[in-house]
Image (cartoon, coloured by chain):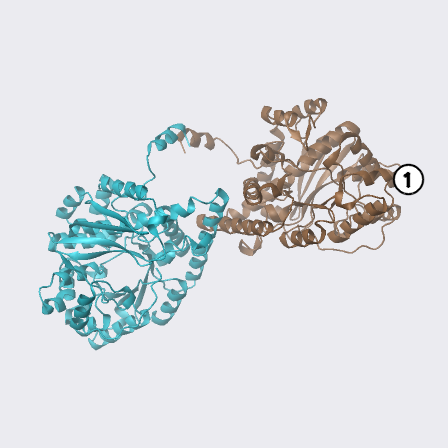
Chain colours: A brown, B cyan
Amino acid sequence: MDIATRVYNHRWKLDPIVRSLIDTDFYKLLMCQSVFTNRPDTRVTFSLINRAKDVPLAKLIDEGELREQLDHIRTLSLSRGESTFLRGNTFYGKRQMFRPDFMEWFENFRLPPYHLERVGDQYELTFEGTWPEAMLWEIPALAVLMELRSRAVLGRMKRFELQVLYARAMTRVWEKIERLQELDGLRIADFGTRRRHSFLWQDWCVQAMMEGLGPRFIGTSNCLIAMRREVEAIGTNAHELPMVYAALAQNDAELAEAPYRVLADWQAEHSGNLRIILPDTYGTQGFLDRAPEWLAEWTGIRVDSGAPEDGAEAAIRWWQAHGQDPRQKLVIFSDGLDVDRIEALHRKFAGRVKVSFGWGTLLTNDFRGLAEGDGLAPFSLVCKAISADGRATVKLSDNPNKAMGPQSEIARYKHVFGVGKQKAEAVQV
Amino acid sequence: MDIATRVYNHRWKLDPIVRSLIDTDFYKLLMCQSVFTNRPDTRVTFSLINRAKDVPLAKLIDEGELREQLDHIRTLSLSRGESTFLRGNTFYGKRQMFRPDFMEWFENFRLPPYHLERVGDQYELTFEGTWPEAMLWEIPALAVLMELRSRAVLGRMKRFELQVLYARAMTRVWEKIERLQELDGLRIADFGTRRRHSFLWQDWCVQAMMEGLGPRFIGTSNCLIAMRREVEAIGTNAHELPMVYAALAQNDAELAEAPYRVLADWQAEHSGNLRIILPDTYGTQGFLDRAPEWLAEWTGIRVDSGAPEDGAEAAIRWWQAHGQDPRQKLVIFSDGLDVDRIEALHRKFAGRVKVSFGWGTLLTNDFRGLAEGDGLAPFSLVCKAISADGRATVKLSDNPNKAMGPQSEIARYKHVFGVGKQKAEAVQV
């Protein structure tokens, strides 16, 4: 390294974890544009939720460092090159996916303030603002907490211990890729931004997937990495859309309609591979049973909770009942994936439907067993919309362990959406 | 990297494997000084011997590239810093290990010409000159051939394949080190220069040993790495001394005395930890049976062929028979070591003698099973003195698979040294 570079590097007060507003999941930007159009003034609060109570984040992560990282993110704005990429790139075969009015807003965007408080061994971290503003905190907030926790553990390790740690992690990822090479017709994407070990590690994993899987690796959800590595940016929509729409419903009838209202708004904007149903927010089976006919025309479905085989079979039955050919439909699995499950699902569904995988935490953060006390194992950290215009949001999911919201509201939602007994599945990552 | 560095790097016509005359085993320099004093004018021929006939070196390694590397080595001379290190450093607690007259010679030294010819799928590579000149080819020649073979295999691999290859190799070395951490009182050195995977890899292994084993890692045989990493340079003497002395013997009586004559010359020059007997050149048991009394006073013994337990037990019995306390004696194991054998030998001999290990090829070149067709597995390549003043050299060793020399001479040596039936052991590395 030359002297100038070293001197320049010494000027950094911190080593920023998130260095770009597009170091985020592509679907956040898609949803942001949709919200910017349809619900720009709704006030939403996002909140960090650490489902792993045994991971004492406030003991592991220094509050000052956390504030520095979050403050740094608030200084970020879209760079000229990033803007050019978003304006000029073809996403899913479509030019100008992002409209000029949205881009103009986004170019002037800064993230709103955060509220951080230590409560016991955990942090309370919330973000309030208009929906399009507050929602863009989710991914960088998660990435910062995950990486600060990694750094806390890594900071105690010696140089060659560290080298060997990464050597082992690389070997593990590569051995997974070698197993995936055996799956004919595989289509798999990286969905691991939010709970990644670190930015550089995610970037490494994406490149390893590119080399190891070739065209079977279809892209990454991370917009910045997609730009830099010249692969597709992948993603459609998430639970926050029906959750906020539902919270805003004035009565039970509106509530029952809310999930479909979301998709009607979405359909007005998007076609093709972006028309993917995420049916599990208030129970997959009920969602499908009451779905309007036009939804069966959509491209596919994303299975994100519950037993994935059940979700896929339910979708297949539903398509058949509506005269659709399941073989022309896309099923995207994205919940708790690792190679065993990917292999099993591919075996079971390849040929019956078009199968695709969004591989998250166990791609970009499988450091299980590699550090003392398993201190680098991934854990279940989320950042969710908890209220909209002052009303609590609710998620039921197909797994009661993923449900959230006030108990009374959960009961009301279960009643409205006809959700009966559910099977609990462990939430690992 | 800054632009100037890049431009500078582009000027290199080749990426030199050996970049320093002290990128060699420390004992070659010790022996060189001894030879420089006692037999400066003896003409010796060294020759490459590939014991692994199934490794077609001439198919794997381009002759032009090999010549370029060897030619580059002939341009090397001792740098000022290297000379200062050799003149000023304390080796084995002794200052001025290298005498001014030897250093003056070495500062003006260049390696003599080589003779290279392709014969079938192998290379014939020989070095002729005075003994002090020709002997310094051994280690760089081996290192060049080993690393060119590595490069040939690595050159066919893709970027992430390469990363994962090294990740796996690093993990393997580290797991060995973790096992060695369990051995109380371990003393172990790197002896892996000659058949290393590459210079950078040996350097990595040494650093990993330093961090992982702390004071249990006692140093490296590689003089350049010892200088750069500030660890001890380790080594004493090798088979070439008795082999050449023996070849020069005028009759059977002189022949029988030759191995002891070597050590008498050595004793005149060295004390302490440098007084290590290497008894196996013409059979360990016979060597000990006929050894003069003064040799029992020496510091220890190096066990380099045959079943290592047998060699160590023979030495213990011999010391006891000569009224020496084996617990005060050093036994250095240096043949075909890997962790299993190190553990077993440490368990068996720690406490009974002072145990030390010189760990070679399976420290610095354990890439077994890591490349396609096992193309990076180490193999048994040596570079030996084959004649002295026109007379063939002979080595018997405690393993007939390591014997060398003309058959008639082997028979004569066996007779003179009273070597009967020997047990053959596979020569792996």
| Label 1 residue SS | helix
Picture layout, residue A385 above or below residue B378? above
Tell me what residue is drawn at x 34 percent, y 44 percent: B62
Chain letter for mark 1, please. A
> Residue B232, image x and y in percent?
29, 53
**Pick the front one: B65 or B169:** B65
In front of the other: A7 or B81? B81
Mark 1: few/some/many CA within 10 Å (<14, 14-19, 20+): few
* Quadrant housing the N terminus of chain B: top left
The image quadrant of residue B68 is top left
For disc 1, the marked residue is A253
User: Extreme bottom residue here?
Assistant: B321
Q: Is residue B54 left or right of residue B370?
A: left
Residue toward you, A213 or A241: A213
Q: Which kind of residue does numbered mark 1 sit on?
A: Ala
Query: Is residue A130 at least partly visible in the picture?
Result: no
| Side of B213 relative to A185 (left or right) | left
Residue B73 pos. (x, y %): 25, 42
Q: Quadrant of the C terminus of chain B?
A: bottom left
Q: In the image, residue B8 lies at what x, y percent?
A: 35, 30
Number of residue marks: 1
Apparent side of residue B116 relative to residue B3 in the rendered image (left or right) = left
Above or below residue B183? Residue A276 is above
Residue farthest to the front?
A: B120
Residue B62 visible to the viewer = yes
Q: Nearer the viewer, residue B120 or B388?
A: B120
Residue furthest left in the image: B250
The answer to whether residue A389 is above or below residue B310 is above
Q: Position of residue B49 (x, y in %)?
A: 27, 56
* A369 to the left or right of B303: right
